[in-house]
Image (spheres, rainbow, N blue to C red):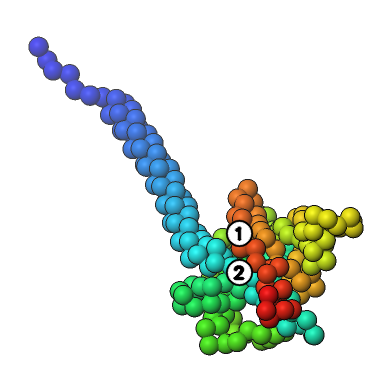
Amino acid sequence: MKQRGFTLIEVLITLILLSMLVISGAMVFQYFQDNWQKTRIRFQTAMTDYAAWQLTNRVLTKTFPHMVISGQQYAFYFLGKEDGFTAVSHTSVQAPGSPAVYRLFKESLPDGSSQLVYEEAVIAETLLAEAGQQLPFSYRLVLFQGKQSINFEYFGWPSLTDREIGSDPLSSVQFEPRAWFTEYDGIKRRQHPLVVQINVEQFSWPVMVHDVSDNLLKTRADPEY
């Protein structure tokens, strides 16, 4: 019996089918490779953000009310606005264990998004005594990039007077209670906020501050207190 071979048409069809399989396989491989690269970049970005958050969170959790002289009276070194704040901590990123003045703020990017920036000035060898004192902010760290929404809120007493009246159970004088504010000036209010909240899109980052403002003011007013 005579053996029949493949015709030219059959060979061409086979080659076309094999080519389609190879192209499809290459496209699938490229798709998975691209997605893997994107996933890897997102993972690396998340890990970088987390490491930066850990460094600064240690500083923020050690925030405390620091008293300075403003004019002829004592007040607190704290300035909070809707786009950032400046405060004092018992520790720092550059020199753990050394106090620092730090500022955390929103910075706009060219593409319309924002990033969260941390800057600090170590004050281990500097006496921070006056409100308008110039400090060397020599350290900068970017925490989160490409965010559409970053803002800050502050919870505390509206003023020293409101706190004094509100803390007196026998007083019948009207006063403003503790509340949330978009701005908090420790010099003007003569108070330090009790909570600072950082909102980064859907993520809320509360910073609790030990409430010793009243005792500090009384100690300065009366050395025997």
Name the amino acid, label 1.
Val
Q: Is residue 181 visible?
A: no
Q: Nearer the viewer, residue 82 or 109?
A: 82
> Where residue 185 appears, x then y in whole percent?
76, 70
Q: Residues within 10 Å of mark 2 (few under 14, many from 20)?
A: many
Q: Secondary structure at mark 1?
A: strand
In the picture, which quadrant includes the C terminus?
bottom right
> Where residue 32 appears, x then y in whole percent?
40, 42
Q: Nearer the viewer, residue 102 or 42?
A: 102
> Where residue 181 appears, x then y in whole percent?
77, 58
The mark nearer the N terminus, 2 or 1, is 2
Residue identifier under label 1: 207
> Where residue 173 appears, x then y in whole percent?
90, 58
Give the residue at x 77% y 59%.
Answer: 167
Q: Write down the quadrant of residue 162 in the picture.
A: bottom right
Residue closest to the far right: 173
In the picture, which quadrant includes the N terminus?
top left
Residue closest to the far top: 1
Disc on res. 64: 2
Give the residue at x 43% y 43%.
Answer: 31
Give the residue at x 44% y 56%.
Answer: 47
Q: Residues within 10 Å of mark 1 (few under 14, many from 20)?
A: some
**Left or right of 2: which side holds 181?**
right
Give the residue at x 34% y 30%.
Answer: 17
Q: CA distance from mark 2 to mark 1?
A: 11 Å
Residue closest to the far left: 1
Q: Nearer the viewer, residue 52 or 145?
A: 52
Q: Write down the quadrant of residue 13 in the picture.
A: top left
Q: Secondary structure at mark 2?
A: loop
Disc on res. 68: none
Q: Write down the quadrant of residue 209 in the picture.
A: bottom right
Q: Is residue 7 above or below residue 211?
A: above
